[in-house]
Image (tube, helix red, strand yellow):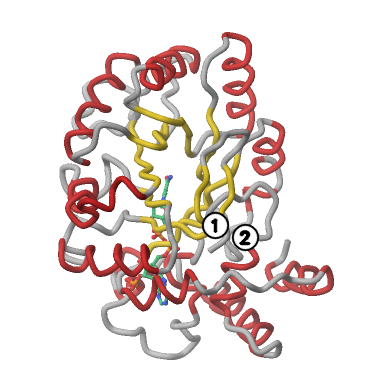
Amino acid sequence: MEKRTLGRSGLEVSVVGLGCNNFGGMKASLDLEGARAVVFAALDAGITLFDTSDSYGIAGGSEITLAAALGDKRKDIVLATKFASPLNRDRDSRYNGSRGYIMKAVEDSLSRLKTDWIDLYQYHFPDPRTPIEETLRALDDLVKQGKVRYIGCSNLPGWQLVDAAWTSRHHGLHRFVSTQAELSLLARGAEKDLVPAIAAANMSLLPYFPLASGLLTGKYRKGAALPADSRMAMPYFQRGMTDQRLDTVERLIAFAEARGRSVLELAMSWLVGRPAVGSVIAGATRPEQVRANAASVGWVLTAEELAEVDAITGS
Ligand code: NAP
């Protein structure tokens, strides 16, 4: 498995990561046994980056389940989690990046994760009320205390990424090495402004929803019944499965199959080849999915192939 460093840092991660937002939650999510099977398949495939959040699952259920599934293996991996989404919203902004909030959130995550340190601590959503300097200073203190090794962010607009990078540099604070944003063959909006801002801020991108919740795995076909036990079989997710998206998927499947490849290989390899991408944090509900995802990044698309993909995806 190829490794990449994030931003301008020594933090090395596998180019395919494991997204853990489906651990420890409602009925459709993975319990400990299911999570353990997925986590060990990921470790066996050479995946080192595991991404969770204090807000995934029920009452920190994703962090708790991931820690229990990893056991002793925790020391061998890059553990990434997030803060900023209070369960009880007692102020008028939905997200919280204030010093007081961060100091409590990190202790709660460390306790749920059963660890003394977090490898990558990410600011999940921007809090419009807290100046970025306050958030960065609090995170800088956590790095100095050894509770956190690197800091990252998520869902920040491009201007704020560059502002955060400049603020860190100006004040001599630790910098965000990465950011998360949605990017896939079915959601390319980040490419216009955000990806250039990520490069300008010397960060790496961890694209989320890389498989468009499974639409880009080839298991959903236009006119065919939805596979049972799949995410799209849940009504909440079906709004992401428009006719237009299914048409695009059919064209991507034909494009990949004409070259002896799968649409999964296309979706993952295309992302790995995008500027600034550090690791593709795909989620999985079964060990065979992780194995397939880990093995899907070997296709280096030619300029002609990339142009054809642009034509299909309308970018
Ligand atoms: P995703 O990676 O696009 O889709 C994952 C889902 O697709 C799996 O749970 C599985 O669902 C299906 N799947 C995956 N591999 C497959 C394969 N090889 N064959 C068939 N089906 C397959 O979406 P995601 O997991 O929601 O997002 C990835 C990660 O990004 C999350 O886990 C989380 O860590 C992160 N994230 C971050 C943010 C943020 O705001 N920063 C937001 C969203 C997500 P089924 O088996 O149930 O069909």
Give the mark nearest the N terminus, 2 or 1.
1
Q: Residues within 10 Å of mark 2 (few under 14, many from 20)?
A: many
Quickly name the residue at label 1: 15
- State which quadrant residue 85 falls in: top left
Q: Is residue 201 above or below residue 272?
A: above
Q: Is residue 1 above or below residue 250?
A: above
Q: Position of residue 95 (x, y in %)?
A: 35, 29
Mark 2 element type = helix
Q: Quadrant of ligand 1?
A: bottom left
Q: Residue furthest right?
A: 304
Quickly name the residue at label 2: 272
Q: Position of residue 118 (x, y in %)?
A: 34, 35
Residue drawn at 71 percent across, 66 percent down = 314
Does the numbered disc 1 mark a residue whose Cβ is under 8 Å from ligand 1? no
Q: Is residue 71 left or right of residue 20?
A: left
The amino acid sitting under disc 2 is Val
Q: Residue furthest top?
A: 171
Q: Is residue 81 above or below residue 294?
A: above
Q: Quadrant of the C terminus?
A: bottom right
Mark 1 element type = loop
Q: Is residue 129 left or right of residue 52?
A: right
Q: Is residue 176 left or right of residue 43?
A: right
Residue drawn at 22 percent across, 51 percent down = 72
- State which quadrant residue 70 falls in: bottom left
Q: Residues within 10 Å of mark 1 (few under 14, many from 20)?
A: many
